[in-house]
Image (tube, rainbow, N blue to C red):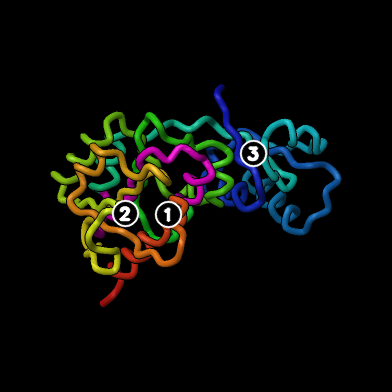
Amino acid sequence: MNQDTVFGLHAVESLVRNESDSVLSIQVQEGRDDQRLSKLINLIKQKNIKLELVPRKSLDALVSGRHQGIVALIKAEIEKTEGDLEDILQGLSTPPFLLILDSVTDPHNLGACLRSADAAGVHAVIVPKDKSAPLNSVARKVACGASEHVPVIRVTNLARTMKWLQNFGIWITGAAGEAEQNIYQTDLKGSMAIAMGAEGSGLRRLTREHCDQLTKIPMEGSVSSLNVSVATGICLFEALRQRTTI
């Protein structure tokens, strides 16, 4: 069976609480005396998940990152597609709030964007199949459990999907430095998708052309751009502010 890993206390705890059926087994560092880890072990036993005590070097060999003494082996991700996106939108009782990530290839950035998306109440994150970071153990660790709550939809043709979203009644706002208005001047309420591009290169031309409007983050000082995960958080929470203001 194909499998992946999730590691770190917070990420594994969220996985066990919310997606225990996807867990094949969990490996814990033997001899580690940690109160939080002990509580998590008790939770794992309550869920009847297979638990193994292993040397630290075994965990080090499984993942390249700070595992905090625990690694979960999980069923490999079954990618969600355009069909799943339609089901998600049809099932909403509130106006859709989506995030589009165009050419974000760093798993750390994907994980950080997912964390912000979950906190801001985003219903789904849409990424292209090509030139996009995988939802691997690194992305899941950085997401701190958000990847178990916010579905990641991988689409074959991002421009076509954006057109489909527009036909569904969703307004798409792209973040671009050349935009005339900034996020505080832009209407981000209602059925909305925010499109973010890779740091430096930004949105690809075709993606930008399929946006209904462009907006920018006002910048002061000498820095010309922000990390994509930071910029994503700023845009999402301005949208959240507008969407929750009475």
How far across and down, in percent of the image, does residue 155 sit? Answer: 31, 33
* Residue in the picture at 69% in, 32% down: 62
Which segment is the magenta one?
Answer: 91-114
Crowding near pointer 3: few (<14 within 10 Å), some, many (20+)?
many
* Residue in the picture at 22% in, 41% down: 162
Q: Would you name the residue on which mark 3 appears?
A: 72
Q: Would you name the residue on which mark 1 appears?
A: 225
Q: Is residue 87 above or below residue 186?
A: above
* Residue in the picture at 44% in, 60% down: 119
The amino acid sitting under disc 2 is: Gly
Q: Between marks 3 and 1, how big is the CA–CA gap?
A: 36 Å
Rendered-image quadrant of the C terminus: bottom left
Crowding near pointer 1: few (<14 within 10 Å), some, many (20+)?
few
The residue lying toward the viewer, choosing from 195 and 223, is: 223
Direction top: furthest residue: 1
The amino acid sitting under disc 1 is: Ser
Query: Could you say which disc has been placed on residue 177 in the image?
Result: 2
Closer to the chain start, of discs 2 and 3, is 3
The residue lying toward the viewer, choosing from 28 and 233, is: 233
Viewed as shown, does residue 131 lie left or right of 86?
Answer: right
Q: Which quadrant would residue 38 be assigned to in this image?
A: bottom right
How far across and down, in percent of the image, does residue 71 sit? Answer: 67, 40
Q: Is residue 236 above or below residue 103?
A: below
How far across and down, in percent of the image, does residue 50 sit? Answer: 68, 36
Q: Are marks 2 and 3 in contact (CB under 8 Å)?
A: no
Q: Is residue 218 above or below residue 131?
A: below
